[in-house]
Amino acid sequence: MSIEISEAAFNPWEAIQRYEQEHIVRQYAGKVGAVATFIGTMRDFNEGDGVMGMELEHYPGMTEGHLQQIAEEAATKWTLLDTLIYHRVGRLIPDEPIVLVAVWSSHRKEAFEACRWLMEELKSKAPFWKKELLTNGESRWVEKNTAGY
């Protein structure tokens, strides 16, 4: 299980490949039957307004702890082999990846369900704060996330 929060831009497909090479292949060779992933990217609109950037803040230590807790909870709800959560913070622009959730399991049902649940828990409860930089020159804090279910 790995939780990473970083200001650095990342390629989610390379992150998955690297994690598989460094962890999955060594520990779970022949046992993986499914990998479910979710990659969230930044949109250039929200609530009817154009968005040209976003500042994403977190509380170091608290945020990682929360993500670790939900990953551990998912492992008690589903039979999972491993989980990777990667989340950006700092300044972002449209089309950049913000979040990656990847789940490895022996069976697709567990992988799909756990990946979706993790993303919804992260999106609705993790301590991140988003400030949108609007195309009209204004900025605003995002008060609520879009519904996932």
Image (cartoon, grey):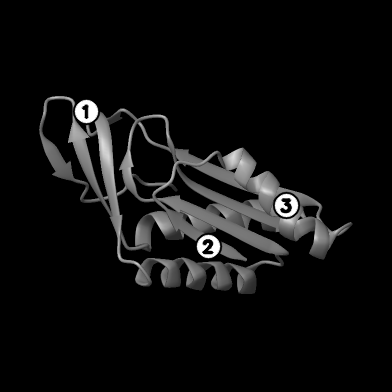
Most distant residue in the right direction: 30
Local SS, label 1: loop
- The type of residue carrying mark 1 is Gly
- 66 over 102 or under it: above or below: below
The label on residue 9 is: none
- 5 over 88 or under it: above or below: below
Identity of the residue drawn at 14% across and 42% down: 140
The percent coordinates of residue 108 (x first, y second) are: 74, 51
The label on residue 3 is: 2
Q: Is residue 136 left or right of residue 45?
A: left
Identity of the residue drawn at 55% across and 67% down: 71
Labels 1 and 3: the sequence-earlier one:
3
The percent coordinates of residue 36 (x first, y second) are: 66, 48
- The type of residue carrying mark 3 is Glu
Disc 1 target residue: 48
Labels 2 and 3: the sequence-earlier one:
2
Dot 1: few (<14), some (14–19), or many (≥20) neighbours within 10 Å? few
Q: Decide if residue 108 is in sight here.
A: no
Identity of the residue drawn at 49% across and 73% down: 69
Local SS, label 2: strand
Identity of the residue drawn at 86% across and 58% down: 29
- 133 over 38 or under it: above or below: above
- 108 over 62 or under it: above or below: above
Q: Marks 2 and 3, how far apart in space?
A: 14 Å
The label on residue 20 is: 3
Q: Marks 1 and 3, how far apart in space?
A: 39 Å
Depth check: give the residue in front, 8 or 149.
8
Most distant residue in the front direction: 8
- The type of residue carrying mark 2 is Ile
Q: Decide if residue 9 is in sight here.
A: yes
